[in-house]
Image (cartoon, rainbow, N blue to C red):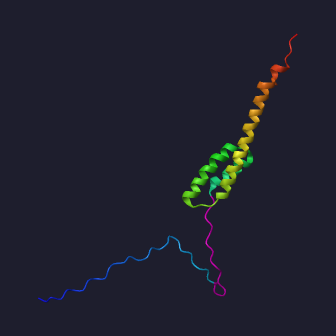
Amino acid sequence: MSDVNPPEPPAYTPPPAQPAYQAQPYQQPVYGQQPYYAPAPPTNTLAIVSLILSLVGVGLGGIITGHIARKQIRERGEGGAGLALAGLIIGYIVTGIVVAYFVVVILFVVVFGVGAAATYNSY
């Protein structure tokens, strides 16, 4: 037997981590070839519904569908975040106006006695 030790194997080094998405540099198309553009993600349907409901005056429906749409957009990576946000903002404004209207009407009825009972006079 010999006193020579076998050489040690080289230490393992893992490969560098790759990012999840790596943007490719833009390449000039070859003559006669059309450039390639990635398609936009689909727009979330509830975001559209939220905006329409809010604009029509159904503020509560716009608020509910807007919150659901924003959650779906975050989870699925869909488009339409601006539509959902606009539906939420308009929905909150419409709901605030409707609530303020009913508060004012009830206040007038209670405080000033405006209504059918105030117009009745018995002699």
Q: Is residue 2 left or right of residue 34?
A: left
Instruction: Examine the residues drawn in magenta and state their main secondary structure.
Output: loop
Residue at x 73%, y 44% (from the top left corner): 94
**Farthest right residue?**
123
Residue 122 painted magenta: no
Residue at x 69%, y 51% (from the top left corner): 87
Q: Quadrant of residue 14?
A: bottom left
Residue 41: % across, % down: 61, 64
**Farthest front residue?**
3
How many discs appear? 0
Residue 57 vertical position relative to residue 116 in the rendered view, above or below:
below
Residue 39 painted magenta: yes
Residue 68 vertical position relative to residue 20 in the rendered view, above or below:
above
Residue at x 28%, y 83% (from the top left corner): 9
The quarter of the image holding the N terminus is: bottom left
Residue 19: % across, % down: 49, 72
Residue 32: % across, % down: 66, 86
Q: Is residue 4 left or right of residue 44?
A: left
| Span highlighted in magenta in the image | 28-43
Residue sitting nearer the eye, 119 or 5: 5
Residue 91 vertical position relative to residue 74 in the rendered view, above or below:
above
Q: Is residue 105 left or right of residue 19?
A: right
Residue 59: % across, % down: 70, 44
